[in-house]
Amino acid sequence: MALVPCQVLRVAILLSYCSILCNYKAIEMPSHQTYGGSWKFLTFIDLVIQAVFFGICVLTDLSSLLTRGSGNQEQERQLKKLISLRDWMLAVLAFPVGVFVVAVFWIIYAYDREMIYPKLLDNFIPGWLNHGMHTTVLPFILIEMRTSHHAYPSRSSGLAAICTFSVGYILWVCWVHHVTGMWVYPFLEHIGSGARIVFFGSTTILMNFLYLLGEVLNSYIWDTQRKPPSWQGMEEEKEKPKLE
């Protein structure tokens, strides 16, 4: 039995995301006052995605609790739709976007933090909030994947959805630059047009790879749990009575 029920974990994670979002929005930074506000940053979009996803998880848990044993077919049908939405959101948005934000942020940060998170931001964003936005996303989504099985959509529809999200965000970043003359991320100012095209293409490919990684990881976790260890299977074979 789990030390902490997964339903309690989801509520705690949801509350932590609500706290992070409230604290982030309360910060008065110049970038929040410019065109696009917080919505031009993938980190903020990811936080909203994670909060909405875990909100759906909590709602699913509550609905499951209320419909258990009721025998109401309409309620069970609505619950199945909610579970399908939860699973789709994890597969297409919560996992790939969350892992992308954590991985890309810390890789660029390690290379040159001024390219992604200038030291000036330390005056506005405390360290714990930075980790709440760029670090804890990964363990939270892995905990969810480990505690509940999620049915992935067909691979073609899943990849099409994540490609649509990726291209949509890239077009949004380009539009913000068109309107303001400034790139959302400092490092885009220091590379040429060709390099930007390569970078945007690479990020789309990486998003697709992360979708596939989530699919494989989900299957591995739950297929392993469902299959008994080989030694256990051998013991069960030995215990079967032989027919004379």
Image: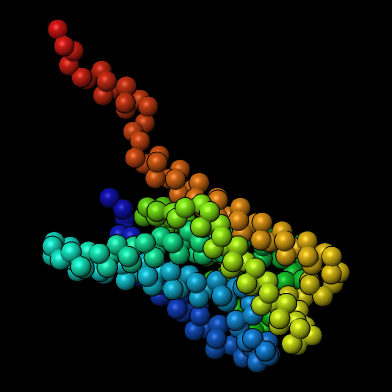
* Quarter of image, res 103: bottom right
Quarter of the image with the C terminus is: top left
Horizontal and vertical percent for residue 48? Answer: 50, 76
**Is 133 placed left or right of 194 in the picture?**
left
What residue is rendered at 63% in x and 72% in y? 168
Q: Residue furthest top?
A: 244
**Is 225 placed left or right of 73 in the picture?**
right
* Quarter of image, res 164: bottom right
* Quarter of image, res 57: bottom left
What residue is rendered at 31% in x and 55% in y? 3
Image height of 113 relative to 160, above or below: below
Which of these two is toward me, 33 or 154? 154
What residue is rendered at 45% in x and 55% in y? 153
Image height of 56 relative to 38, above or below: above
Which of these two is toward me, 123 or 208? 208
Q: Is residue 174 among the parts visible in the rendering?
A: yes
